[in-house]
Amino acid sequence: MADGKWRRAGATLIRVIAVWAASALTLLALAGILPDFQLQSDDGDTVTRTAFTAAWGAGAFGLLSALVWPVLVRALLIVPALVLGALVFFLNGSLLLIALRLIPDGRGDAAPETAVVVAAVMSAVASATSTAFAVRDDDAYRRRLSRLAYRRRRGRPADQGGPGREGPPGTVFIQLDGVGHDALVAAAAAGLMPTVAGWLADSSGHRLTPWRTDWSSQTGASQLAILHGSNHDVPAFRWYEKETRTVMVSSRPASALEMQRRAIERTRDGGLLTIDGASRGNLFSGGAGQLALVLSMAARRGKGSRSRAGYFAYFSDPANATRTALSFVAEVVREIGQATRARARKVTPRVKRGGLYPFIRAFATVVERDVVVAAVLGDLFAGRTAVYADLVAYDEVAHHSGPHSRDAEKVLERLDRSLALIAKIADRTPRAYRIVLLSDHGQSPGETFVGKYGLTLKDLVRAGSGLPVPRRAQRTRSASEARDAVRIALHRPVEGGVDEQAAKLSDPIVLASGNLGLISFPDIEGRASREQIDRRHPALLSTLANHPGIGFLLVRSEEHGSVVLGPGGAEVPIAELSDEEGPLAVFGAGAADAVRRTDTFPHVADIMVNSMFDPGTGTVHAFEEQIGSHGGLGGEQSRPFLLWPRGLTDPLDIMAAESAESSGTVGSASASVPPGGGLVGAEAVHRVLTRWLQESSGPQVPVRAEGFAGPGPVDEPFPPGAPGAGPTAARTAQAIEPLPPPNRQDPAPDTTGTTA
């Protein structure tokens, strides 16, 4: 035991000396290259004296980086993340200037701009040297990665495994945001994602299946259901609620928190990650006690709830900060170059990619990726039971470059390297881990609605309602057709293009979520009926339904109940909807059930609009500025994937067991297994993931007796003012009955090791 401690101490000392020497040599080299950087007095020094000066400066810079940098980063967490990234260079250069001032006799000097360059190079060299030594020592490598990741060790259960990797395995869920099933398969086959290809090719590795999203094929609906078990009343990425006169947007912290609260209130379940879980880079917490970059928690105050808390541990290492900052700048330059090249080659379809977008892309593809991956690595070393992390890089790039573009393929390559790192570290951790890969939706390509037809959905709605439209839209054929429809419906000309009666009413609210549009009339209480809309705007519904860029509408009728309207006067009561014929036939299996389910939501829009879909090309027309879109029905956007280790129960067996228990369930698209395999609805995915956690860690899953369940320890009480809060309100544990064993003839699940 003592000999081992001395060996580790000796190895640590050797690494410190090696990093110090490398930093000193770097200083000497830079002093010889850069004109505004010196390590000698004006009269010159001997080689020995100069080397001593370099060693002194390198040592002072290293100490300042270790002691002062973490304090500075913690203090700067109050600034936005992008600003923090920009300050990295300035802070590092400032520390170097201070270190040079500490050299005796004032022999160190550098111009401020030169100090920034020198500090960045020194940090990179120190990081590379330290890592090179550490990777040869498993313990040191593990300690280094653990320090770089965000973790807070609380009391760990005794059965979480030690050096022998004993005890139940943990589970890591990695969400590749926006990567569809077909896109993943194509990338693996093309060699873009060798890690994923290896998992698929290994007979003992992973299995892959597609699953079908709800009508709202976007992260807000999918991830809410995956983490919290319900996406009821989430009709789109953004929607209007008449009773409060507010627009809910899934990417706003306050909206995300409210969505999470409603889901927990409906399910009475704290979330997928309530037992010793960690939520990284997600919209919702999943009930996890460990959080980093969780949007819903950004709306709350208190320790551990801030959305930027995960940045501290990562940026507290100046080498990490420097590397990510350099990658950030490189990504901005890469995006500007790719956008310029696309314009020069007149690539179509194409959207504008200027303004802040290059910085937003760099944040998603570099900063958020690096911080989330580091946090996951820390969770592995901390031995957490369940980790769910979202990597959003592909989704962001595919929106603007296209889901099948070379730009998006490059992102998939880099994401695969992150997966390889996680898998490699999972093999070195004290606890065995199973790695589950999944996506929340796919993306469908296609020219934007405005690019194809020259006007936005809002312009079309206003033109069809006889309301003023911009001059740009007035000149388009679509607007002219809409205005003609108004004249015919009113049996009189419309002077100036405006129906005076319609103009007195409040304007409709038109929202877009990919190729799904939502139209609401704020001055009509409750859900407006078709008859009310026709009395107010006689030509609107027919104008929308017959537009070539629109596939179908959903609207409530006082006489027939909710109906789906399509081109050529097609009108089908929702109870008679079919996937084989009618307006939904081109959208494939499950479309009718998805529409019927959304029709039951309290906040479904007065008019739900889905764009056209061409099954031959797989294209849709987004109502937003996106050439890769998701949010509605049509194509790859509705077909994400689930990739799981073979040792876990097949999802179809889990669904079959559920169906056997609750046969006859009607009205929920999440309760069935679709023809040809796969899962239907994000709520079904939640149940599968919950079952897998049961298989690894036992049947106890905590739920709340009432109301809100937030992040924190298992015995955390309700927040003050939450529904159900009271002196005795607290988390409770409810045993979930184990499901019957699989019906298939596959080998029995192995719950002791990792297959990643």
Image (tube, helix red, strand yellow):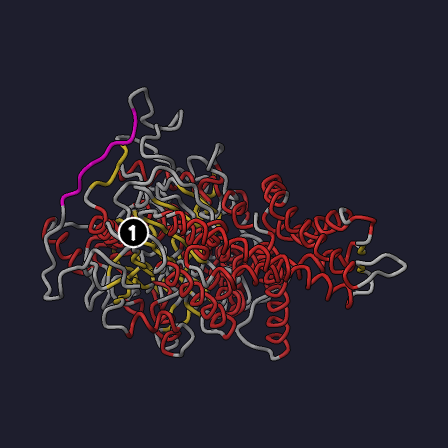
The stretch drawn in magenta includes residue 733: yes
Image position, residue 498 (x, y; %): 56, 53
Nearest to the observer: residue 712 or residue 381: 381
From where the camera sits, is residue 750 visible?
yes
Q: Residue at x 31, y 67 (%)?
A: 587
Q: Look at the numbered disc 1 and give the secondary structure of its residue.
A: strand
Mark 1: give few (<14), some (14-19) or many (20+) Cα within 10 Å. Answer: many
From where the camera sits, is residue 517 visible?
no
Looking at this rendering, what residue extends furthest in the right direction?
43
From this view, report whether residue 156 is shown above or below residue 373. above
From this view, report whether residue 88 is shown above or below residue 412. above
Q: Residue at x 19, y 44 (%)?
A: 699
For residue 264, what is the image quadrant?
top left
Which residues lie in the magenta part?
729-737
Image position, residue 336 (x, y; %): 63, 68
For residue 324, what is the image quadrant?
bottom right
Q: Quadrant of the C terminus?
A: bottom left
Q: Residue at x 39, y 25 (%)?
A: 721
Q: Is residue 387 left or right of residue 24?
A: left
Nearest to the observer: residue 51 or residue 625: 51
Nearest to the observer: residue 685 or residue 327: 327
For residue 592, what is the image quadrant?
bottom left
Q: How many marks?
A: 1
Which residue, given by chain and number where applicable, does mark 1 sit on? Answer: 170
Q: Residue at x 34, y 54 (%)?
A: 172
Q: Amino acid at mark 1?
A: Gly
From this view, report whether residue 398 is shown above or below residue 697. below
